[in-house]
Image: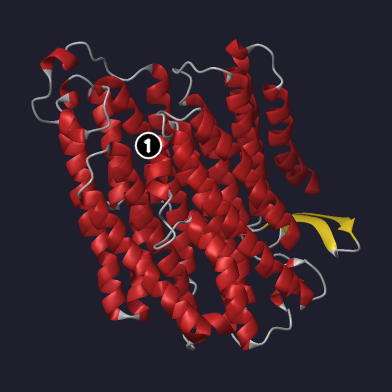
């Protein structure tokens, strides 16, 4: 079965090279979509053979392990467990929809644009399947290259290079901290192999140092306060597809890395003051992001700060369960909620950015105060936008409900005050998201603009309808993800017990 994993790894790379050097720009989008759809089908094929229960090798399946460097004691080691599978399915669902969302747009060097998206997919698959610290870092850096070009070359306004460069500096410097941390662990272990890193001979001071070095890289990528400074500007000035990739998928790399690497490597540091500090930062991020979103009038900035708030809750839930486990109350609830909400957030935030893009094309502005009345001339768009919005609000029977509920409960179980503050995300989200929807879809609006506006096109309907299916599907059947990640999370949180 390792052939399935090899195909999942290589198909996006082959597709990227093929599209990048495709000479006919006119059909490059179709070719890229074809490769991404093939990758999606391959991902569902792997899911069909995935064993949801424990196996003889624990949670790991579809393993590839090829010697890479005896001197560095590093292998090209890849494998899929429940955590990987959730992230792989999310990636392989979103990439074709992200590509399809750009079909109504005309841009220069479109073959390069689509080639970079597929290269991004290749890097993401590598991050989510790597079982070697050095390989994980290499793929982590690979993802930075395509998104920097996508955001910097095809952004919407003149200042895009300024903000894209800020994003690059933040993430690259953060990555260097992670590399330093991984090397430090490597020196105290037998190799870069994941299990050897888990059992590295580190004292408490070593663990605290490693924790903060690696956490900085993840904190920038989530991001959480105070490492968020790059986020809103980059999301706003990137092309819509760049914003989708950044928020829908790149942020999930850090959540995945947090569970796969940081928690098992540094349990003593988390049990000390480090875990509590991060938890408080995350809860502050939840409230801070939501309050800033409340006063925004730019549609993309509202979504950016909404994403900041929701990601803060995901990370808070992960650390709340870790701290409860370290205090003797073994639980994986926070991890389960984090994985459900990561999948849900990826679907919802991509949908919201696409809705913002559609609104921009119809009203020629991102200022929600200058919109209004669209529901009466675009009813299909109004309904689909509403379903995606409800998912982001965490309305029952949508994908955002169960994960958000579990995460808030996890934080509440650890600390009542922090739990109550985390719960504010649902109230505040209702404020800024319903304001966003109300301004755009209702009210009088400019009749001269509305008279020429039509409902969404077939491509726009296909993208939004596909996303709404997953909003409802996961809302009704969240147990699918819980069962998938259960054995992996038990291993991860079990490793915290010492």
Instruction: Give the camera-side residue of 136 and 238.
Output: 238
Q: Residues within 10 Å of mark 1 (few under 14, many from 20)?
A: many
Q: Please, is residue 69 above or below residue 299 in the view? A: below
The residue identified by callout 1 is 353
The residue depicted at 75 percent of the width and 38 percent of the height is 10
Q: Position of residue 130 (x, y in %)?
A: 71, 56
User: In this rendering, does residue 330 appear at all?
Assistant: no
Q: Which quadrant, please, contains the C terminus?
A: bottom right
Q: Please, is residue 445 above or below residue 255 in the view? A: above
Left or right: 235, with 135 as reference point:
left
Left or right: 294, with 480 as reference point:
left
**Residue situated furthest left in the rendering:** 444
Instruction: Give the camera-side residue of 343 and 291.
Output: 291
The residue depicted at 9 percent of the width and 30 percent of the height is 443
Q: Please, is residue 253 above or below residue 98 in the view? A: below
**Secondary structure under the numbered disc 1 in the rendered image:** helix
């Amino acid at each position: 079965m390792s052939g399935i994993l090899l195909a999942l790894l290589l198909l996006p790379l082959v597709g990227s090279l093929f599209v990048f050097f495709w000479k006919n720009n006119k059909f490059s989008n179709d070719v890229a979509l074809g490769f991404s759809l093939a990758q999606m089908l391959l991902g569902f094929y792997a899911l069909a053979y995935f064993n949801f229960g424990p196996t003889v090798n624990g949670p790991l399946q579809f393993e590839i392990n090829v010697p890479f460097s005896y001197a560095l004691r590093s292998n090209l080691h890849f494998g899929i467990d429940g955590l990987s599978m959730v992230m792989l399915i999310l990636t392989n669902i979103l990439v074709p929809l992200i590509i399809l969302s750009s079909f109504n747009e005309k841009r220069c060097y479109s073959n390069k644009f689509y080639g970079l998206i597929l290269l991004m997919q290749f890097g993401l698959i590598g991050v989510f399947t790597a079982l070697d610290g050095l390989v994980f870092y290499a793929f982590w850096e690979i993802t930075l290259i395509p998104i920097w070009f996508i955001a910097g070359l095809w952004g919407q306004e003149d200042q895009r290079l300024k903000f894209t460069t800020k994003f690059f500096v933040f993430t690259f410097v953060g990555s260097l901290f992670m590399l330093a941390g991984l090397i430090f662990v490597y020196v105290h272990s037998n190799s870069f192999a994941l299990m050897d890193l888990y059992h590295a001979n580190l004292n408490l001071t070593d663990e605290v140092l490693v924790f903060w070095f690696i956490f900085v890289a993840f904190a920038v990528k989530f991001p959480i306060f105070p490492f968020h400074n790059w986020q809103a500007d980059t999301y706003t000035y990137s092309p819509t597809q760049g914003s989708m990739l950044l928020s829908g998928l790149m942020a999930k790399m850090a959540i995945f890395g947090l569970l796969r690497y940081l928690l098992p490597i540094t349990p003593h540091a988390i049990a000390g003051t480090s875990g509590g500090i991060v938890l408080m930062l995350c809860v502050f991020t939840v409230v801070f992001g939501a309050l800033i979103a409340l006063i925004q009038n730019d549609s993309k900035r509202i979504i950016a700060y909404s994403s900041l708030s929701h990601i803060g809750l995901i990370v808070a839930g992960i650390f709340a369960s870790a701290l409860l486990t370290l205090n003797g109350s073994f639980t994986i609830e926070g991890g389960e909620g984090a994985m459900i909400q990561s999948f849900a957030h990826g679907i919802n935030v991509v949908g919201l950015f696409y809705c913002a893009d559609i609104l921009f094309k119809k009203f020629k502005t991102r200022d929600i105060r200058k919109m209004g009345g669209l529901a009466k001339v675009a009813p299909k768009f109004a309904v689909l936008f509403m379903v995606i919005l409800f998912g982001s609000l965490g309305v029952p029977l949508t994908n955002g409900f169960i994960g958000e509920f579990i995460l808030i409960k996890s934080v509440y179980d650890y600390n009542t005050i922090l739990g109550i503050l985390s719960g504010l995300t649902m109230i505040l989200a209702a404020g800024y998201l319903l304001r966003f929807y109300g301004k755009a879809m209702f009210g009088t609006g400019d009749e001269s603009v509305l008279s020429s506006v039509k409902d969404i096109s077939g491509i726009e309907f296909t993208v939004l309808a596909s996303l709404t299916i997953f909003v409802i599907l996961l809302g009704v059947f969240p147990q699918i993800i819980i069962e998938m990640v259960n054995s992996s999370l038990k291993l991860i949180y079990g490793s915290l017990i010492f």
